Amino acid sequence: MKIHEFQAKELLSDYNVPIQRGHIVYSSNEIEKTIEKVQNEFNSDAVVVKAQIHAGGRGKGGGVKFCPSTESAIESANEILGMNLITHQTGEEGKLVNQILITEALDIEKEFYFALMFDRAKNADVFIVSTEGGVDIEEVAEKTPEKIVKAWVNNDTYLLDDAINTIINALSLNSFNDAFEIFTNIYNCYSNSDCNLLEINPLVITEDQKIIALDAKVDIDSNALFRQEKIAKFHDTSEEDPLELKASEYGLNYIKLDGNVGCMVNGAGLAMATMDIVKHHGGEPANFLDVGGAANVDTIKNGFKIILSDPNVKSVLINIFGGIVRCDRVANGVIQAVKELNLNVGVVVRLQGTNAKLAKQILDESDIELISAETIDEAAKKAVGLVS
Amino acid sequence: MSILLNKKTSILVQGITGSEGLFHAQQMLDYGSNVVCGVTPGKGGQTATENNLPVFNSIEEAKKEFSIDATVIFVPPRFAANAIHEAINQNIGLIVCISEGIPVRDMKKVKSALDNSSSTLIGPNCPGLITAEESKIGITPGFICKKGSVGILSRSGTLTYEAIDQIVNVGLGMTTAVGIGGDPIIGSSMIDILKHFADDEETKGVVMIGEIGGSMENEAAEWIKNNFNKPVVSFIAGQTAPKGKRMGHAGAIISEGSETADAKIKILKECGVSVAKTVSEIGETMLQLIEE
């Protein structure tokens, strides 16, 4: 689960990690008094106005503005709050800015890139740092990989202290007495908060020689939210695709894509393989939809509702491998759902597994129009055929 | 012969009184698995399943009355890591964790406990394993399996079933199918399972199913090139998955170039592994290789 910059900074602050401080604004009538508050609290006229959306690339998209005066701050804040911000991560449609963060403006001497995540290949957490901060880190990784330093941490072979010393050396922070403690605190924040990713870009050295997190991007392990009460409340549903959100309420795993062949499959791997074979036969999948290992009448009905909410969908391909769930039951579920929902798109059904033959017979003999198929290959060809 | 599991393997079910645990314990018994007892803390003294298997409060108690070769875990995700730790502490040789949704931080601790033990963990978030016509641990539908000569290894549950079905339908049949799970941290890697198949005389070829995310398939490909003499057919799901989107399996996040389906397919081919173009061609591809 992604959270906003101001929320991520709150987590870091809880662990005594120095952050660029500020206050959040939700509505335009709070703008002037919040700017005044930030100016007074941090003793400077200049402030920074930052759009709070989950996507990266906010600065380039015009969602982050340095404002040297009160007037410019008021103007920028009014412009950014409520704007539709388009960045390379939001897609063409952009994201509505519902809240802005107004922060102190700092005099910066150096900018670093900093991230902590889990490295699956090494089975360890990994610090990733670079002296080239504040810019597109992927470009740095590609053009000058030697400028990226990694240091691993696990319970056995890679010690936290060693990793921190490595990154302090890499960033030439040896003269900063508090650097070791700050990085230890960041690691504890990452670990105790069940972060999948904690990225600070940039981590800065100010002109008065302080280490400060200027930004923060955090992704939390959704499976751990049951024990992260504070973070669970950070969930911002307005940042999610409404269909994906609705699907998750039904207990379905749905991701909208750009094609017109709707796919309903049980199991994530089989769902991906089904999308792949649709594409292989010249079609474009409209979505990824995993109805879960045990498909039943309700999951299929809800799956149809979600798929058909997408107006681009011109045919639906159902691919269910009935293991414990018998295919004849799934077939009856499909028939019931199609009848109740008054479908106006072609539906191709491939059921394999327990009682598959009986299921096919039920589908073939039903009075509704369904196209049955025996193999995934045949099903994909037929579903693509319906839209071309 | 088979790997990891045969009809003699004595099995304990952790979480046997829960609805999932109870249902699948019965399914396993019906298939012929040697399930001997179950554990649910606080429910010791009860019996479970139509076979009236005894329920114990802990594995330690169960071990006083039964010799346990393997355990299968059907407990809610927030308690599952502790269930694995209990099995490791009790020196159970084979631990199979079906539970889905265990926090990564919990699995980091499990992994480190596992490295210092003699236990083998399959999963979590997996369908378990099945040796055709002998025994199953987990949730794989038994009726699709027929004895034969192909080993199956997969990161995805329903794709495991799909592969079994095709291998049986082309007439080859199977030895053991192992679903290793799709999470970022799992107990046994592809290479771990391939090593077992290498030593199994009955297994003449292996189907290996991977997906986007992580680099396990790439490591397995290199290992196969240098160490494995039996034919391998691979399939990688997620060729059309958009970058950065999460496709259900927590593990299937594309974060680096080498984690895409295309990159994995390329490395597998370079290492001499046959890659099925689509999911429909897994069985036929294996048949051709074995006939050659």
Image (spheres, coloured by chain):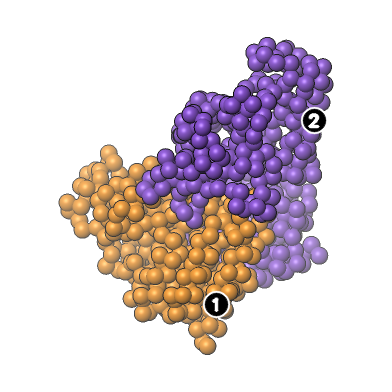
**Residue A269, image x, y percentages:** 57, 59
- Whole-number angstrom distance, CA of label 1 to CA of label 2: 53 Å
**Residue B37, image x, y percentages:** 26, 54
Q: Which mark is residue A83?
A: 2
* Subunit under mark 1: B
Residue at the front extreme, as displayed: A175
In the foreground, B104 or A347: B104
Q: Colour of chain B?
A: orange
Q: Which mark is residue B272?
A: 1
Tell me: residue B290, above or below residue B141. Answer: below
| Mark 2 element type | loop
* Subunit under mark 2: A
The chain letter corresponding to purple is A
**Residue B229, image x, y percentages:** 44, 80
In the foreground, B137 or A171: A171
Viewport quadrant of the N terminus of chain B: bottom left
In the foreground, B119 or A185: A185
Labels in figure, total:
2
Q: Amino acid at mark 1?
A: Gly
Few, some or many C-alpha atoms within 10 Å of disc 2 (few <14, some 14-19, many ≥20)?
some
**Residue B125, image x, y percentages:** 46, 53
Compared across the picture, whether A26 is left or right of B280 comes to right
Residue A358 visible in this rendered orientation of the protein: no
- Where is residue A47, by image quadrant? top right
Residue ID at (72%, 30%): A51
User: Which dot, 1 or 2, sits closer to the camera?
Assistant: 1
